Amino acid sequence: LGMGEGEGDRASMLITLANLKEHPESVPINMLVKIKGTPFDNNQDLDPIDFIKTIAVARIMMPASYIRLSAGREQMNEQTQALCYLAGANSIFYGDKLLTTSNPNLDEDLKLLEKLGIEIEGKTCEGKNIAA
């Protein structure tokens, strides 16, 4: 999210996913990480509340799916990440790098989940994801 799309675009994406014959097992939701020299470098930052609302709607529309916080977590503060979990995100990718961007330190992730009272369902090093 944050690539210049509007609320209608985000809603359309979620409706398309929710109307599949079976809901996706995994719905990664990314926050644009701006990289100098790319076409999106000068995009206006997405309001964190709009990002959180998208997660909440995804959770309501696809209750059995893993709603994964993906790219952009490194740029989010702890409060934004906490609100994402409370809104319905129940999985993260972790590790050194996610394609072109880095992830927060695993210890920081685990401390935040513990602080929020979120129990970990499964942790895999191979798949580099944690489900809560």
Image (spheres, rainbow, N blue to C red):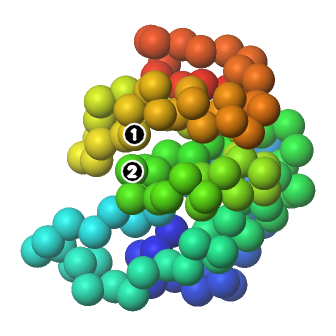
Please tell me which of labels 1 and 2 falls first in the chain: 2
Disc 2 packing (10 Å; few <14; some 14–19; many ≥20):
some
Which x, y percent locates residue 111? 57, 30
Q: Is residue 13 visible?
A: no
Residue in the image at 34% along x and 85% along y: 43
Q: Residue furthest front?
A: 115
Q: Secondary structure at mark 2?
A: helix
Which image quadrant is residue 11 in? bottom right
Q: Amino acid at mark 2?
A: Glu
Residue in the image at 78% along x and 56% along y: 87
Q: Is residue 111 above or below residue 102?
A: above
Which image quadrant is residue 37 in? bottom left
Q: Is residue 48 above or below residue 101?
A: below
Which x, y percent locates residue 94? 44, 30
Q: Is residue 115 visible?
A: yes
Q: Which residue is mark 1?
A: 104
Disc 1 packing (10 Å; few <14; some 14–19; many ≥20):
some
Picture quarter with the C terminus: top right
Q: Secondary structure at mark 1?
A: loop
Say the numbered circle drawn on residue 43: none
Residue in the image at 74% along x and 18% along y: 121
Q: Residue furthest left?
A: 37
User: Label 1 vs label 2: CA separation?
Assistant: 5 Å
Q: How many marks?
A: 2
The reply to whether dot 1 and dot 2 touch (C-beta < 8 Å) is yes
Foreground residue among 108 and 36: 108
Horizontally, is 26 left or right of 75 in the view? right
Q: Which residue is mark 2?
A: 74
Residue in the image at 37% along x and 27% along y: 95
